[in-house]
Amino acid sequence: MTEHVSISEAARATGLPAKTIRYYEEIGLIRPARAENRYRVFGPSQLHELAFTARARALGFSIEECRALLALYRDKGRASAEVKEIARAHLAQIDAKIADLTAMRQTLAHLVETCAGDDRPDCPILADLARGEPSPGRP
Amino acid sequence: MTEHVSISEAARATGLPAKTIRYYEEIGLIRPARAENRYRVFGPSQLHELAFTARARALGFSIEECRALLALYRDKGRASAEVKEIARAHLAQIDAKIADLTAMRQTLAHLVETCAGDDRPDCPILADLARGEPSPGRP
DNA sequence: CGTGAGTATCCTGTAGCGGGAAGGTCAAGG
DNA sequence: CCTTGACCTTCCCGCTACAGGATACTCACG
């Protein structure tokens, strides 16, 4: 009745590639209706859920986190504490990644600084990689 | 003749899982010799290359970057400029990731702060995810 | 009636391994 | 001599979050 749109229009409306939307349906994130010709049909609520998911993904939430957030989003009676807990856990992951990358950056920046970068073979970067301890964490 | 060791000893010496070492051989990063019984045999130079790779990976270099760095490592006549260029490019990638994550962190931290986190259903996090613009970049 | 755009499904590939199956090898113990 | 158990081997599937492409349909338009 209202604004029921095709997958390409849903893609345009949400900024998600059509492939991604099909994938989201395949893994059960969203459940678009089907027209008689088997074409997917997206109503306003599906479009909102897609946009919701797109935004959560842009904030770095994993698909499974998005699934949980979507469930809470659909459940009008949920406690905000549940949402906050997911967000806080994800925030902690982000902080961990930032710390990890910052440590890497520090080491690597120092190596880049101390390397002459000319046509001589002497290179402190390779020397450090060859001798150094396994060093800080990973991304 | 010298210290030629098995894969499990190589793993212990480098901190890499044996599976990972086999994988590195499979993709042609390293070329361990074989004993008569088809067992892999690692000499000192292979061990150094494995440790080198482990350290580079810990600094966030991709496998292909490691391949390039290994080639430069083996080439005693290389120019340090080549190494520096790889390292600098990787440093730029790290900086981009940090910037990306920091932007996410900012948005998410704000949302977490403004959420009551109690048993009431009212949640600004979900509200923002539902309404917001696609927002900052991705990891 | 054809044509081009849009849609459908299915299959493959990506990075960097981890887990586990099925089987060979080797030294020590009974 | 035989067996156990710790190694080692190869092979194949799984993961994340899709992208790319092949093949086939459906539909509106001229």
Image (tube, coloured by chain):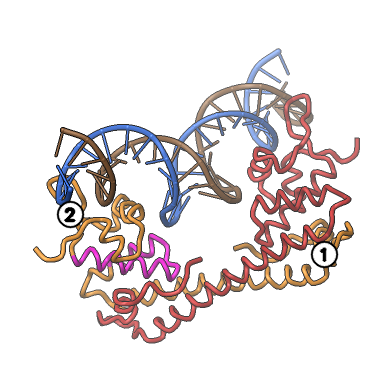
Chain colours: A orange, B red, C brown, D blue
Residue at image coords 42%, 66%: A61
Direction from residue A136 to residue A90 in the image, left or right: left
The extreme left residue here reads A1
Circle 1 packing at 10 Å, graded few (<14), some (14-19), many (20+), is some
Q: CA distance from mark 2 to mark 1?
A: 60 Å
Direction from residue B84 to residue B119 in the image, left or right: left
A119 vs A85, nearest the viewer: A119
Which quadrant of the figure has residue B7?
A: top right
Measured as percent of width and height from the top left, residue A129 is found at 78, 59
Q: Identify the image quadrant of the C terminus of chain A.
A: bottom right
Measured as percent of width and height from the top left, residue A44 is found at 19, 67
Circle 2 packing at 10 Å, graded few (<14), some (14-19), many (20+), is some
Residue B24, placed above or below residue D8: below
Which residue in the protein does label 2 denote?
Answer: A33
Measured as percent of width and height from the top left, residue B137 is found at 47, 70
The image's mark for residue B7 is none
Q: Earlier in the sequence, mark 2 or mark 1?
A: 2
Q: Identify the image quadrant of the N terminus of chain A.
A: bottom left
Residue at image coords 63%, 62%: A138
Disc 1 marks a residue whose amino acid type is Gly
- Magenta range is A44-71
A28 vs C19, nearest the viewer: A28
Task: Please determine if labels 2 and 1 lie on a single subunit.
Answer: yes
Q: Chain of mark 1?
A: A
B49 vs A86, nearest the viewer: B49
Q: Do residues under tags 2 and 1 come within 8 Å of each other at their CB atoms? A: no
Residue at image coords 81%, 49%: B48
Q: Chain of mark 2?
A: A
Task: Identify the element where label 1 is drawn.
Answer: loop
The image's mark for residue A117 is 1
